[in-house]
Amino acid sequence: MPDKLLAQISQYVSENIGKFHAARLESLNKLNLKKVLSRKNPYLFKAKYQESAADIVKTLLDAHLSSSEETIFGDWLEGLAIFISSIVYGGQKSSATGIDLEFEKDSVRYLVSIKSGPNWGNSSQVKKLENDFKQAMKILHTSRNKVKVEAINGCCYGRVFSDKGFYKKICGQKFWELISGRENLYIEIIKPLATDAKKKTEEFGEEYSAKLNLFIKDFIHDYCLEDGSVNWEKIVKLNSGTRK
């Protein structure tokens, strides 16, 4: 990678990585025990013989945060990819529905829908993406008759490369190479991503511990019996009951 491009990426990460960490904290602070508990499978907890308030609450909290962070960081990586493409190929955020990035390279107009990883959606979500690609390609062909268009489902990590007919699914190294022209960009972006990571993780850890303690306290108060055992009947009613 040219030093200038690496410096630009490092500066972008330095100026924007805080948004990811701030979004993590916001997601954590907005959590409500009752809402989280009502969305999780109570039968699974029982089947795994989880009878400790601390164990149940930690499982709830970690599952929510894992899913939330994947989404938050996926959105952040999308912004990084658009930034890199804008520097190298003049890429820009697309105005087309379901399309994240547009850029031209070697006389080809690329329409890119960016996902975090290869296993990102169910069949209906994939179908929607296909329809979005078809609509965007139709508009481009109408407005720019002679332009060659390629639709890409680009994934920030993974090793999948497949031709779906009218669009291609490109993941990991090949995706980052497509938007930058650099074979090893997928490795080179690792270092700047660590900017302030230790400090931010420690700050998040303090907030996490406080939230965990509060949730355990509330769980014991609201969902445990006087002898300290879990009130599974109340939890199941909260989660699945239709009658008050």
Image (cartoon, rainbow, N blue to C red):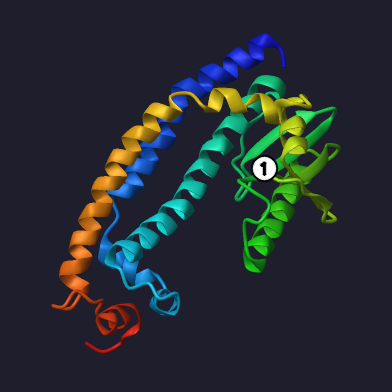
With respect to residue 125, does 90 lie above or below? above
Residue that numbered label 1 is attached to: 157
Residues packed near mark 1 inside 10 Å, few (<14), some (14 to 19) or many (20 plus): some
Furthest-front residue in this view: 227
**Which image quarter is the N terminus in?**
top right
Tell me residue 62's x, y (percent). 41, 55
Residue 144 sits in quarter: top right
Tell me residue 210's x, y (percent). 24, 47
Residue 132 sits in quarter: bottom right
Q: Which residue is drawn at 24% across and 60% down?
A: 216
With respect to residue 239, does 103 lie above or below? above
Tell me residue 164's x, y (percent). 82, 56
Q: Residue at x 19, y 74 (%)?
A: 228
Choose between 54 and 40: the one closer to the eye: 54
With respect to residue 91, does 44 lie above or below? below
Tell whether 13 sits left or right of 190.
left
Q: Which residue is drawn at 44% across and 58% down?
A: 63
Q: Which residue is drawn at 41% across and 57% down?
A: 64
Answer yes or no: is residue 142 visible.
no
* Three-letter code for the amino acid on which mark 1 is drawn: Tyr
With respect to residue 74, does 60 lie above or below? below
Furthest-left residue in this view: 226
Choose between 211 and 96: the one closer to the eye: 211
